[in-house]
Amino acid sequence: MKLKPKTLLILTLMFLSMVTLEFLSGEFYFEKFFRLQKEKQLSNIDFITSQGGVNSQKLRSFQNTTNSLVLIVKDNEIININDFDYFSLETNEGQKIVLLNAFLNNLYSENKFYLTDKEHIKLIGVNILANRYYLPISIQGIDRVYEDYKFASMKNLETYTIKGNVSSTSYSGYLSPQSSNLVEFFSKFSELKKSNFQENLNPEIELIQKSIDGYHVFIYYSYQNLSSVFPTLRVYFYFKAIFLLLLTLVIGQLLDYFIINPIVYLSKVTERISKLNFKNDIVYHKNDEIGELYFKIDEMAYRLEDVIKLYRDEAEKNIIKKEELEEKIMSFMHEIKTPLSLIMGFTELMQDKYKDDEDFDIIISEAKRLLRLSEETLLLGKNIDVKDSLILKRFDIIPVIKLGLYIYQKELSEKKIIFNDEREIFVIGDREKIEQVIFNLLKNGYNYAKSEIVIDVEKIEDNKVSISISNDGNNISESELPKIWNKFYTTSNSYQRGLGLYIVSNILKAHNSKYGVINLKNSVKFYFTLQLDEKKSGV
């Protein structure tokens, strides 16, 4: 991926991660955090004294500070009843206490609510504790009716009808902001009606319950006030997301201008340099890491241009020297033909005189081979394909190898030669040129062998014969192995390869031979293949 798309992708992922984090923190973490903090604050109860009483002043302060409503029950009796608006009702079953806070806050009546002492009323209400404490739904006097329509619309509530006389009323003077929700609280919280009180109530109910020294404390708080803050927070998060998006775009543009564009331009400069175009048009001159990189590349381009110029000059000189050397070789090969012809003529005269001496045959054969070599060298100079001059015939390869060993017996006298193959192995090829191959490989072997030369001939697959000549000389560098067949190639250890192996490679290519050189553990092995003539072979 290119640098610019990659940077944009990173910035996009960073932006999405930040927005996602903001969303999750706003929707989940903060709300839960505030709720936990609120519950922690409400759980810090300090109005139950060590003597087992209730401190009314601390209770009022607690409710005001925490914005909550506290109900304290002990032995089926509401201890802090004076914190509520209520009236007592004398009935045939005893005294009933009717809590009015929620009723008054939810009363939908144009008439002002009032009760008179000893007034006979009919009450429809909900029992909240021990058949003694009730919440009113409807209060019917002699000439008026008060109803809590909100409470009356609630379903699945068990109601009671009670008749009696008002014996007393009480106005607490304490208006809790939570009292309007008290009805829903009592309708949901059935545990208040039981004699056994349990903690860890339904967390969806905004209620904390504690049991302290026989007191059962119910702290009701409204989460509505806290939740109302979150629409504003959400707007804040939305604006923050937009701000982050704009900030990401600005950062992207700055990165594009100050970092990406210079690097992209630098990439184009290096691409141009790789094509050997050293035009200096670098325009970045700031004193930072990128500017330093531009300076280094510019300096490298200057030096590289000088090196290439020097190399070209040297290459031109080498080409001239190579052409001069080839011209000298061609001239030598041309001039050597005359003395070789004279040597052959005098040798043939001597052979007629000393017919029993076989050495004259070898002299004549080698003189002819030198003449052929000179002719082939002259043909190579004229770029004439060796394949066009091949004379293919069947011949035994073993005598050719023995002839080479005989010719170079003096040079090989200090080496151990491992070869005693007496089979007849007939192959198809140009015998004189294969002689040239074997003689060159033998000469190469005694030049580099330390003490031993191994010659091996074996039949291989595809009806071919493999001939290998190994010497225990130093291994050739792996990087130089493919190059030793080149014309006038010289290895790093200054071994002069000259034209020998180059001529060998041309002859073997003309024979469609598989040839090569490999490094063994303690030797170097040259090998080539020839077509086997099975009809006349002993393999």
Image (cartoon, rainbow, N blue to C red):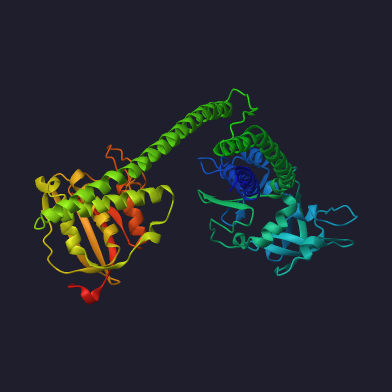
Count numbered badges in the picture. Answer: 0
Q: Residue at x 17, y 69 (%)?
A: 424
State the residue in front, 109 or 273. Answer: 273
Image-based side of 461 in relation to 238, left or right = left
| Residue 446 left/right relative to 478 | left
Q: Is residue 84 above or below residue 56?
A: below
**Residue 539 image position (x, y, % from top left):** 18, 72
126 lies above or below 407: below
Q: Nearer the viewer, residue 334 or 94?
A: 334
Q: Position of residue 520 (x, y in %)?
A: 22, 52
Q: Is residue 86 left or right of residue 367?
A: right
Residue ranking furthest to the top: 287
- Image coords of residue 196 (percent x, y): 53, 61
In the picture shown, does residue 130 fall above or below 293?
Answer: below
Image quadrant assignment for residue 44? top right
Residue at horizontal 75 percent and vertical 65 percent from the top: 154
- Residue at the limit of the structure toward the bottom, as seen here: 535
Q: Quadrant of residue 63?
A: top right
Residue at screen point 60% across, 40% down: 55
Is there any visible trace of residue 401 in the rendered image?
yes
Q: Position of residue 206 (x, y in %)?
A: 64, 53
Seen in the picture, residue 512 relative to 288 is either above or below; the reply is below
Q: Would residue 100 be visible to someone looking at this image?
A: no
Of the pair 459 and 219, the residue shown nearer to us: 459
